[in-house]
Amino acid sequence: MDDTWAWTPPVDAGIGPGQDLSLEISWCVAPSAFAPLTSAAPLAVVLIHGFGACKEHWRHTLPALGAHLPTYAIDLVGFGDSSQPRARLADEQSDHHSMHYGFDLWGAQVAAFCREIVGRPVLLVGNSIGGVVALRAAQLLNADAGPSPCCGLVLIDCAQRLMDDKQLSRQPAWMAWIRPLLKAMVRQRWLSTALFRNAARPALIRQVLRQAYPSGAHVDEELVELLYRPSRRPGAAEAFRGFINLFNDHLAPDLLAQLDLPVHLIWGEADPWEPVAEARAWAGRFPCIRSLQILPGVGHCPHDEAPEQVNPLLLAIAEQTSRTQQAPNQQAPDQQAT
């Protein structure tokens, strides 16, 4: 079931003082034959897509999880069918029609969605940048949960955001020389729009999908269309401009270091953009990470490329989280798998 929700971001989440910008947020909940049971369920799952994707990217996850517990998917601001306001960079003048895209905005959006729409404890599941959004949303819900505390997270090939300024020490030395020029160029709206229009073509989308899904499984016309359709909306290039100019924003390790909630990692071993070595490093570094499941031969979007492997993992984590939620004094067993 698809629906929309009107949301006004707080001043510290993308809008300036005095702004009152109402956004239309698109979301869906899995239809379930077990509505009388799930309406009383102690836990709901909220699915958060990655960059350039949308709620429909969870096409194989929603029905599988929705048959067992309430499961929602949401379009982040700038993507899918949600509002796509004009992008304002951090040093640009604020006005009533623009906003600063970033993880504070998206995290506040997901946290408000949980409080106002879901209205019960949640397990947040994020793919790629959706993983960073989930971490920021969990942080905000920890501070002000209302009826919807976050009980755990699943990060699926979480974005490492290597172009962030704080990651400069991990980049080749020559990157420090070209970085000022790169920043000056990509902030130009004419250039970011041209780059977006070039990328948002079915042929190029198929080419990128061949990299992201190394097995080729589930790369079909439905997938190409669900990614291409939102890119044809008039404001689609604005979210692209906002995102490619995020050079100083939240990083997953910084958020993980502050988190006191169970986190589970699911990672495609053949991910071309987010190396699995980083997932292993996180699992050994952060006490909040309770399990790491590595899927051989799978790429950046395991939930869509290999749903027959990912859905049982998500259901097991949801059931474990639900049991812990019902019996908070009972310690759930941790697992570590590679």
Image (cartoon, helix red, strand yellow):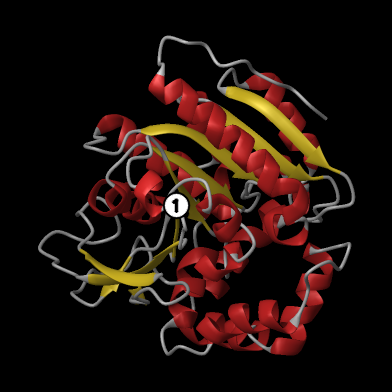
- In this rendering, the answer to whether 254 lies above or below 100 is above
- In this rendering, the answer to whether 231 lies above or below 95 is below
Picture quarter containing residue 6?
Answer: bottom left
Q: Is residue 325 visible?
A: yes
Question: Few, some or many C-alpha atoms within 10 Å of disc 1 (few <14, some 14-19, many ≥20)?
Answer: few
Q: Secondary structure at mark 1?
A: loop
Q: Is residue 166 left or right of residue 236?
A: right
Depth check, front residue: 132 or 246? 132
Q: Is residue 128 left or right of residue 256?
A: right
| Residue 128 horizontal/vertical position (percent) | 62, 53
- What residue is at 54 percent from the left and 59 percent from the top? 49
| Residue 123 horizontal/vertical position (percent) | 46, 39
Depth check, front residue: 90 or 53? 53
- What residue is at 39 percent from the left and 55 percent from the top? 106
- What residue is at 77 percent from the left and 71 percent from the top? 209
- What residue is at 55 percent from the left and 73 percent from the top? 186
Query: The disc labelled 1 sits on which kind of residue?
Result: Phe
Picture quarter containing residue 19?
Answer: bottom left
Depth check, front residue: 328 or 129? 328
Give the position of the N terminus as an image quadrant: bottom left
Mark 1 lies on residue: 34
| Residue 115 horizontal/vertical position (percent) | 26, 46
- In this rendering, the answer to whether 22 lies above or below 285 is below
